[in-house]
Amino acid sequence: MIVIILSIFSFNPINSYSKYKERIAVNEIVSDIYMIQTKSLNDNRSNFIQFYEKENKYRLFYDDKEVIKSVGSNGITGTGTRSLTFRYKEGNVNIANTILVMFEHSKYEIIIHLETGYVTLNEK
């Protein structure tokens, strides 16, 4: 009986919903990374995505236009440097780079493998 009551009180639908929204926000970033990769394969123009250190926004440049996007659910990106830009046509020096995305209830690590095009998403 006590176990049932404790399990009912330990379930917090508000935290679960917040974590769900955070996962949607990080999935949108991953989707934008793949979109820039795809546009770079099909286009001779310079396409890139840029992340900033401890910012709530990131920048996309494709189809000769610039788009500034906010990280949903008040997430903040971390790169370990001032900014990190992925230019697929012009090439990058590093083979893999990591973007941290921090939220109130969770933290994610997005690893971009430039040699294969794969993106790995890890929850920390």
Image (cartoon, grey):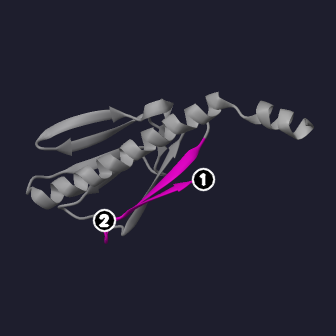
Give residue 116's position: percent from left, percent from top: 31, 71
The quadrant holding residue 86 is bottom left
Q: Residue at x 88, y 40 (%)?
A: 3
Residue 84 can be seen, yes or no:
yes
In which image quadrant can residue 68 be found? Answer: top left
Inspect the image, locate mark 2, and give the three-letter code of the amino acid beneath it. Gly
* Distance between mark 1 and mark 2 Cα atoms: 22 Å
- The foreground one among 89 and 42 is 42
Lateral position of residue 83 relative to residue 42, left or right: right
Residue 4 counted in the magenta span: no
- 7 and 85: which is toward the camera: 7
Horizontal relation, residue 95 to residue 67: left or right: right
Dot 1 crowding, Cα within 10 Å, few <14, some 14–19, many 20+: few
Residue 67 location in percent, x, y?
24, 35
Corner quadrant of residue 42 = bottom left
Q: At 23% across and 65% down in the image, what residue appears?
A: 91
- Judged by its main secondary structure, the magenta piece is strand
Q: Which residues are magenta?
A: 106-123
- Residue at (17%, 53%) from the top-left corner? 39
Q: Secondary structure at mark 1?
A: loop
SS class of the residue under badge 2?
Answer: loop
Q: Quadrant of the N terminus?
A: top right
**In the depicted structure, whether residue 2 falls above or below residue 108:** above
User: Which residue of the protein is positioned furthest toward the right in this rendering?
Assistant: 2
Mark 1 lies on residue:
124
Which residue is labeled 2 in the image?
117
Judging depth in this view, the residue of 45 and 107 nearest the camera is 107
Q: Is residue 50 left or right of residue 122?
A: left
- Given the image, on which type of amino acid does mark 1 rest? Lys
